Image (tube, rainbow, N blue to C red):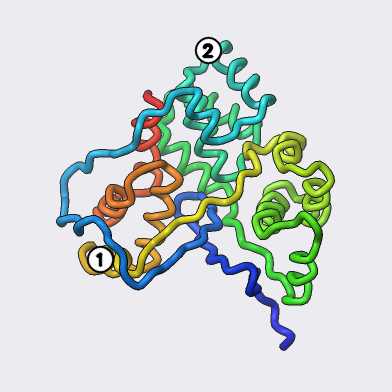
Amino acid sequence: MNKRKVIQASALIIILVLVFQAGVFAYAKVAVTPKAETEESPETNTGPVQSEVVRSSYDQFLKEFSVQETYRKQIDQLVAGGYSRAAVLTAYDFLYHNFGNVNEWTAMLEARNTGKTWEALFTQYRETHKDFIPRSFESEELELLMQVQGATSDDIMIADRLSFVTGKLFGDLLNAKLKSGKWNSVFEQEKVLYSGNPFPRVRITEEEVRKYTGDSKLSDQQVTHAFVLAQKLGESAKVVVTKVAQGIADEIIMAQSYTEKYGE
């Protein structure tokens, strides 16, 4: 059958979750199980929701994002140049999940220093960047890629995303990783704020989907979106689902969580 197909193979069972509303793309493997013990359903809440994000120290930040030495030095330079560490880490965190580059990092910090809110900056970023659309592979092409020694399903997805933001050829980027053995040096060369860590996997049970769609009147897609956003922010899924159900914009949710995580 000669149909173009999005990445698929028996050895590559991956669901792609596109968080386009937040300007954030995530490949997420969603494991759905029939039954699981979950938290009690959140009651309808129309008031402020307390964040459950844990404050992150600088050392924890470096470990969480596997920050390359080049970018560690740049963080020190930015802080020494007058930017607050909280602002530097917030911008890095946001751009990391968007495969943003070094120039966008400094531009966002400069704009922040003029008094713009994080919500406004995140919204502006979303509005000025095209949504990532995963490339389609012929099933035969995918099978060949999966047979390449040293190439993993994550490598294929990372190369696809990096190709989109840099304009470089997918094959050239994948070959660069295979040659060096790691993605971190490839990202440094392209000046993109990503370490090459595997894309996050988000576990959502069938029971959780039913619970949140029933209680909050959200769609399956909205619940999945909330879970992925929560994972990126280090936030409780219950908190994010509740905020989404209240109609709070993703950019506001992100700004609130980053403030809790890194400070003002």
- 263 and 113: which is toward the camera: 263
Q: Residue placed at 80% from the left, 49% from the top?
A: 178
- Looking at the image, is mark 1 or mark 2 earlier in the sequence? 2
Answer left or right for 261 relative to 129.
left
Pointer 1 residue: 211
Q: Residue placed at 63% from the left, 67% from the top?
A: 12
Q: What residue type is labelled 2?
A: Gly
Pointer 2 residue: 82
Q: Residue placed at 65% from the left, 73% from the top?
A: 9
- Rendered location of residue 249, percent (x, y): 35, 49
Relative height, residue 80 to residue 239 (above, below): above
Per the image, label 2 sits on a secondary structure element best described as loop
Which of the two discs, 1 and 2, sits closer to the camera? Answer: 1
Toward which corner of the image does residue 160 lie, by quadrant?
bottom right
Relative height, residue 130 to residue 221 (above, below): above
Q: How many labels does the image show?
A: 2
- Rendered location of residue 207, percent (x, y): 30, 68
| Residue at the extreme bottom | 1
Answer left or right for 111 relative to 181.
left
Toward which corner of the image does residue 141 lie, by quadrant?
bottom right
Q: How crowded is mark 2: few (under 14 residues within 10 Å), some or many (20 or more)?
A: few
For the N terminus, which image quadrant? bottom right
